[in-house]
Amino acid sequence: MSETILGQIRGWMQQGLWGRQLAEQYTSYIDALLLEIFRESGNPENLLLIATGGYGRQELAPFSDIDIMFFAENRDDAAAAERILYQLWDRRLDISHAFRTPRECLEEAFRDIRTRTTLIESRYVAGSRKLYEKFRKDIYPAIAYRRQRQFVAEKLKEMGKRHISVGDSVFLLEPHIKEGDGGLRDVHTVLWLSRVAFKVEQLQGLSVLMKAHDYKRLLDAYDFMIQARYCLHAESGRRNDVLSFEFQRAVAGCLGFADSKKFSGPERMMRYYYLKGKIIRDISHAVLVKCSRQYMPVFRDFTKKRLTDDFILSGGKLIVRPDDLLARRPEKIIEAFRHFSQTGKKFSSAMKE
């Protein structure tokens, strides 16, 4: 990354841009730069430049790869794509690229789950609008809406392995902002699966899959994680997503967490990080269950155990009877937490309401 671009990003941060707003600003900056280079290269009419992956999602971080795909009817325009790539590299941009024909898009998407995932988040940047219409009409629906069961199963399996590999807990001392439990990748997984299962193509579409309060909480937590990642990249001066002790004070300062009488700035930041990570983890889990339910069986423990006249253990969850008991008798909330501590089982959705 050039010092010019990094300086521009720091300027936006100082202006108060936050989270998704900051990432979208940087993405728009790169969009304009790529469009300019595409046109300077002769604006090849038989070539299409598509943003994929995190770039397609409009969530670029300062040292992220800029994922792009050149799309053409055949490989006759590969030389034009190569000329554009050389200019991008001359600008010191971290480009991750591919050149694909329609047939290659489909073959590679169904051969490699990661390729399919990046293409699901595709977005127009420059080139032939006619080719983009063809991509959206003939290629994209097959990639997004065929073999849904396989895609959902593989992404859930991938999510489980990812959590184990970086620490299967939100409350790590040095959490991985992107890949960790309650991190950005959990939000991405929700976006991928909701797109495949419910054809939700924008973040705003998630509002139909959850309550308004949970949707707002998810967006706030998502914004915080993006901002924390921006601060970590800026303070470390490289691609770095592990919030290690080395950078926690600098990142805390970047995020606005100062020392207080009781806690240091890094301690305040980490407490807030855990709060936001838990929100992402809990809400993501609920949405992923909805997305996966129609493609694979959901195995549950249907045994019931009566704990008291008011509380039942069923399906691995604590249930209260009747549903409005806690609203009518708030003192029962204390009893609910006692059962939670004794059984280790989570509250049902009705109890959380």
Image: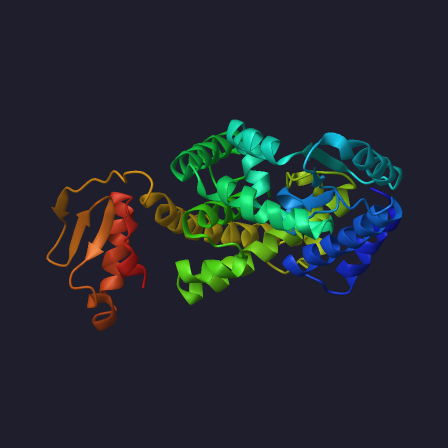
Q: Is residue 131 above or below residue 104?
A: below
Q: Residue at x 22, y 63 (%)?
A: 332
Residue 11 appearing in the image: yes
On screen, 189 above or below 20? above
Residue 293, percent from left and from top? 32, 45
Q: Residue at x 35, y 46 (%)?
A: 289
Q: Position of residue 31 (x, y in %)?
A: 76, 52
Q: For this rendering, which residue is in front, 308 or 187?
A: 187
Is 164 located above or below residue 353 in the figure? above
| Left or right: 211, with 187 as reference point | left
* Residue 23 in picture, x, y percent from top left: 69, 54
Q: Nearer the viewer, residue 71 or 183?
A: 71
Direction from residue 82 to residue 156 in the image, left or right: left
**Number of numbered discs:** 0
Q: Which quarter of the rendered picture does the N terminus lie within?
A: top right
Q: Looking at the picture, tell me which residue is in the foreground, 31 or 257.
A: 31
Residue at horizontal 52%, vertical 27%?
111
Dividing the image into 4 quarters, which one contains the C terminus?
A: bottom left
Residue 106 found in image quarter = top right
Q: Which colour scheme appears in the figure?
A: rainbow
Q: Is residue 173 visible?
A: no
